[in-house]
Image (cartoon, grey):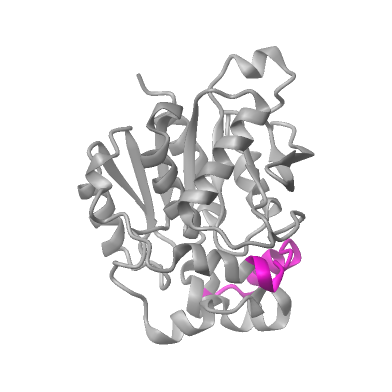
């Protein structure tokens, strides 16, 4: 398994925590194209450790302002502003090009980054995500539970609702939900609301075809948050998209981490 490190960088007026197996001071690692991962709404960098530890490609992520160990921004940002911040993170680390992966809410940011900075991205991975506000929506009960960060603030509440909102293994394995809850760091209310604000009114549906980078769309077959039909829309709408599905729910990248890591490594090492 790769060794994951943690560092803090002062970027564009923010002190951001960066976690991953990418060391910009390691010449051997710098010779490879790293994978930058954008996480889901309210989710801290630490939740991606099980996946990053399994990847052979150097990978890293960072806590957005107000999430995990990064302080909240005084001014809320739109998706284009967060994509600019991600580009500044790459500049600060001395990275010219990278692969991009977006999970759930982070998939929207990944699509925005790919459109905004096509020269900086080689390959794109979109997991458990959709085209934004114009999508096939989840059930209203799921949407209501996703509107607040309560699941991050109360472990007992998370265990109670995990099966309903995440589906898959969480439906019948409360121990898995309890274990997942141990690694969650609650976002600030300002950080959570700022991510909701960034996504409000945002959609990639009308320009998705403009993304030319090879793209792998990954989806769980039992995902209450992002119904799987959205993955088919993404894969068909992208200029060079393909679809992989997994017999699990919204968090298949953690519950099926070994297979997901193998598929990502294989895709990023093509051609």
Residue drawn at x 25%, y 55% as measured from the top left: 232
Q: Which residues are magenta?
A: 171-191
Residue drawn at x 36%, y 62% as measured from the top left: 132
Q: Position of residue 6 (x, y in %)?
A: 78, 40
Vertical side of 132 occupied by 93: above or below: above
Q: How many marks?
A: 0
Q: Position of residue 106 (x, y in %)?
A: 50, 54
Quadrant hosting residue 94: top right
Q: Quadrant of the C terminus?
A: top left
**169 or 182: nearer the eye?**
182
Q: Is residue 184 magenta?
A: yes
Residue 259 visible in the shown view: no
Residue drawn at x 71%, y 61% as measured from the top left: 72
Give the main secondary structure of the magenta stretch. Answer: helix
| Left or right: where 17 falls relative to 134 | right
**255 or 206: nearer the eye?**
206
| Left or right: where 110 falls relative to 237 | right
Q: Position of residue 29 (x, y in %)?
A: 65, 19
Residue drawn at x 35%, y 67% as measured from the top left: 133
Residue 96 visible in the shown view: yes
**189 or 268: nearer the eye?**
189
């Amino acid at each position: 398994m790769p060794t994951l490190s943690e560092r803090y960088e002062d970027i564009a007026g923010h002190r951001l925590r960066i976690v991953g197996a990418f060391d910009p001071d390691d010449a051997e690692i710098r010779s490879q194209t790293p994978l930058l991962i954008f996480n889901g709404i309210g989710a801290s960098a630490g939740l991606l450790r099980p996946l990053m530890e399994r990847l052979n490609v150097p990978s890293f992520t960072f806590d957005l302002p107000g999430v995990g160990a990064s302080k909240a921004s005084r001014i809320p940002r739109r998706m284009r502003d967060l994509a600019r911040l991600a580009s500044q993170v790459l500049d600060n680390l001395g990275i010219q090009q990278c692969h991009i992966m977006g999970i759930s809410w982070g998939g929207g940011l990944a699509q925005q980054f790919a459109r905004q900075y096509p020269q900086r991205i080689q390959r794109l991975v979109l997991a458990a995500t959709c085209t934004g506000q114009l999508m096939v929506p989840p059930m209203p009960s799921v949407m209501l539970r996703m509107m607040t960060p309560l699941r991050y603030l109360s472990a007992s509440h998370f265990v109670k609702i995990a099966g309903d909102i995440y589906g898959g293994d969480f439906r019948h394995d409360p121990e898995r939900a309890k274990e997942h809850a141990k690694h969650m760091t609650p976002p600030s209310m300002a950080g959570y609301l700022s991510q909701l604000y960034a996504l409000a009114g945002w959609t990639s549906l009308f320009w998705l075809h403009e993304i030319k980078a090879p793209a792998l769309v990954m989806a769980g077959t039992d995902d209450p948050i992002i119904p799987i039909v959205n993955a088919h829309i993404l894969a068909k709408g992208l200029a060079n998209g393909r679809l992989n599905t997994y017999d699990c729910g919204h968090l298949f990248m953690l519950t099926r981490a070994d297979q997901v890591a193998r598929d990502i490594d294989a895709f990023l090492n093509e051609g």
